[in-house]
Amino acid sequence: MDCLFCRIIAGEILAEIVYQDEDVFAFKNIKPEAPVHILIIPKKHLASVTEANLEDTLLMGKLIMTAKKLAEDFGISKSGYKLLIRVGKGGGQEIFHIHLHLVGGK
């Protein structure tokens, strides 16, 4: 397995896990850009949004709803936060496993 995020999900690489369920895994970014910087990923490997299809619609929505819950849990819901998904090299994607950045607390 050569996907960094798949290895984190499998427990091969340590991460500071903040949430997980049967579909979604969330952990603190090791290079945070703000006091709260969490990566929310599907447990299903999808390299990019361009790989997602209609059967992934609920999963993609679950990523956003998980971000909403974590923003509440980390106390940034009322002050506001940013959600970001980079798509492809031209979009700045560095790790090819869909990941949603939850950034806030500045």
Image (spheres, helix red, strand yellow):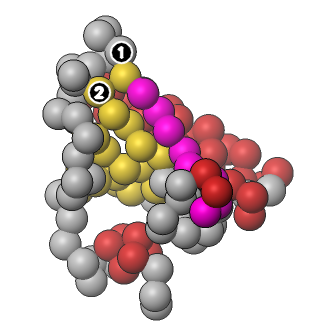
| Front-lying residue, 81 or 54 | 81
The residue positioned farthest toward the front in the image shown: 90
Look at 41% across and 70% down and name the residue there: 5
Asked if residue 21 can be seen in this view, the reply is no
Which residue is at 48% across, 46% downward? 100
Which residue is labeled 2 in the image? 104
SS class, disc 1: loop
At mark 2, the secondary structure is strand
Residue type, numbered disc 2: Gly
- Is residue 35 depicted above or below 90 in this figure? above
Classify mark 2: residues with Cα within 10 Å, few (<14), some (14-19) or many (20+).
many
Where, by quadrant of the figure, is residue 16 drawn? bottom left
Check disc 1: other Cα within 10 Å, few if <14, some if 14-19, many if 20+.
few
Answer with left or right where residue 11 lies relative to residue 25: left
Q: In this view, does 79 lie above or below 95?
A: above
In the image, which residues are magenta?
82-89
Q: Mark 1 points at which residue?
A: 80
Picture residue at 67% right of the left edge, 44% below the top: 58
| Residue 12, image x, y percentages | 27, 83
First of labels 1, 2 by sequence position: 1
Q: Where is residue 10 in the image (x, y as percent from the top left)?
A: 35, 78
Q: At label 1, which amino acid type do we have?
A: Gly
